[in-house]
Image: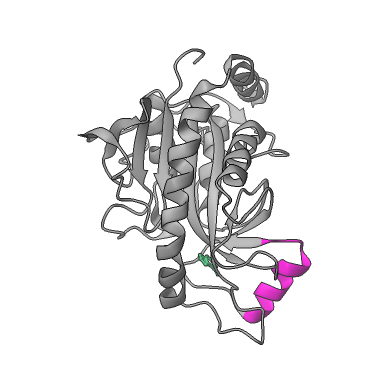
């Protein structure tokens, strides 16, 4: 994987129209895990090879539980991606993470219940063994640092870190749940980071997220509870910031040296596979 940088961009709601790509080309692919959420859209951003994929499909008809996360990550890896930078909407569990802010999360708390979160599932055609992927630092710190530097330069309101609580959805949380997630130390809340990030780590990819705060979930008595309408309204504003950030950050990522980091990521996978004893 050393050498050429190619960046996969998984677009969340509202970010899945990749009009930022030059020389766009659609590619229909299928994987051993089935079909990704939609076509891969290949192209360049400021001369850097990129692959855009709409997480929920371009018609936004795939709900969080039903996203084929394995096919999405497999397809991006197969296409030669070295990095995956994703965008997603999220709720806020802390007053200072305000709607309109961007967060570069560094940790997650997994509350999903219905998703396959490994490529190493013991099935025929899957890679051999069981992969006990370390998850102490799931988001790529190097990519996050570049994102933070760019956000600072662009003067975008942002947070360098944050713990993302990932719920199964599609429903939003109850007030009791929302308050419990706050007590657990969650900063933001969403529905898609897991297992996407786990699979990206298994695939040896550098994964980082541009998480855009759209609402205060439902823990605050002095605010309306989250609704689709509120999320959509704030997201519209945030999308412009996320696009500006992506345009700035992609050439920066491509100009860094990644060979050592890539080697470490791949070793983290191979060193943590337990093969069946013969
Ligand atoms: N996406 C945007 N806002 C959210 C919230 N409050 N909970 C879960 N996912 C979200």
Where residue 189 sits: x, y (%)?
Answer: 60, 62
Vertically, is 13 above or below 3? below
Query: Which of the colour schemes (rainbow, by chain, secondary structure, one colour) is used?
Result: one colour
Vertically, is 233 above or below 22? below
Q: In screen coordinates, is 199 left or right of 237? A: right
Magenta includes 179?
yes
Vertically, is 191 above or below 173? above
Q: Residue at x 54, y 64 (%)?
A: 100
**Which part of the image, by quadrant, shows the C terminus?**
top right
Magenta span covers which residues? 175-187
Q: Quadrant of residue 126?
A: top left
Q: Which one is in front, 29 or 230? A: 230
Magenta includes 194?
no
Can residue 117 be seen from the camera position used here? no
Q: Quadrant of residue 96?
A: bottom right
Q: Which one is in front, 130 or 210? A: 210
Vertically, is 24 above or below 58? above
Where residue 101 sits: x, y (%)?
Answer: 58, 60
Q: Which one is in front, 177 or 185? A: 185
Q: Residue at x 38, y 49 (%)?
A: 55
Q: Residue at x 33, y 33 (%)?
A: 31
Where residue 198 sits: x, y (%)?
Answer: 57, 40
Where residue 143 sits: x, y (%)?
Answer: 59, 34
Report the label total: 0
Q: Which one is in front, 233 or 200? A: 233
């Amino acid at each position: 994987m050393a050498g050429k940088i190619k960046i996969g961009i998984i677009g969340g709601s509202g970010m899945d129209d990749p009009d930022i790509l030059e020389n766009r080309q659609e590619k229909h692919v299928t994987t051993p895990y089935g079909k990704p959420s939609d076509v891969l859209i290949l192209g360049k951003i400021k001369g850097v090879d990129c692959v855009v994929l709409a997480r929920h499909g371009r018609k936004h008809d795939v709900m969080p539980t039903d996203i084929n996360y394995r096919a999405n990550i497999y397809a991006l890896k197969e296409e030669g991606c070295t990095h995956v930078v994703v965008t997603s909407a999220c709720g806020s569990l802390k007053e200072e993470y305000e709607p309109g802010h961007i967060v570069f999360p560094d940790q997650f708390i997994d509350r999903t219940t219905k998703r396959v979160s490994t490529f190493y599932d013991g099935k025929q055609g899957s890679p051999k063994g069981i992969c006990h992927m370390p998850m102490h630092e799931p988001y790529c710190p190097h990519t996050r640092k570049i994102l933070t530097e760019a956000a600072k330069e662009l003067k975008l309101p942002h947070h360098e870190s944050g713990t993302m609580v990932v719920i199964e959805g599609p429903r939003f949380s109850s007030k009791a749940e929302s308050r419990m997630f706050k007590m657990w130390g969650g900063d933001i809340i969403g529905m898609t980071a897991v297992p996407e990030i786990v699979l990206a780590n298994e695939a040896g990819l550098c994964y980082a997220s541009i998480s855009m705060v759209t609402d205060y979930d439902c823990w605050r008595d002095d605010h309306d509870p989250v609704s689709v309408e509120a999320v959509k309204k704030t997201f519209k504003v945030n999308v412009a910031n996320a696009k500006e950030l992506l345009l700035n950050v992609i050439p920066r990522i491509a100009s860094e040296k990644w060979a050592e980091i890539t080697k470490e990521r791949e070793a983290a996978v191979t060193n943590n596979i337990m093969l069946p004893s013969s």
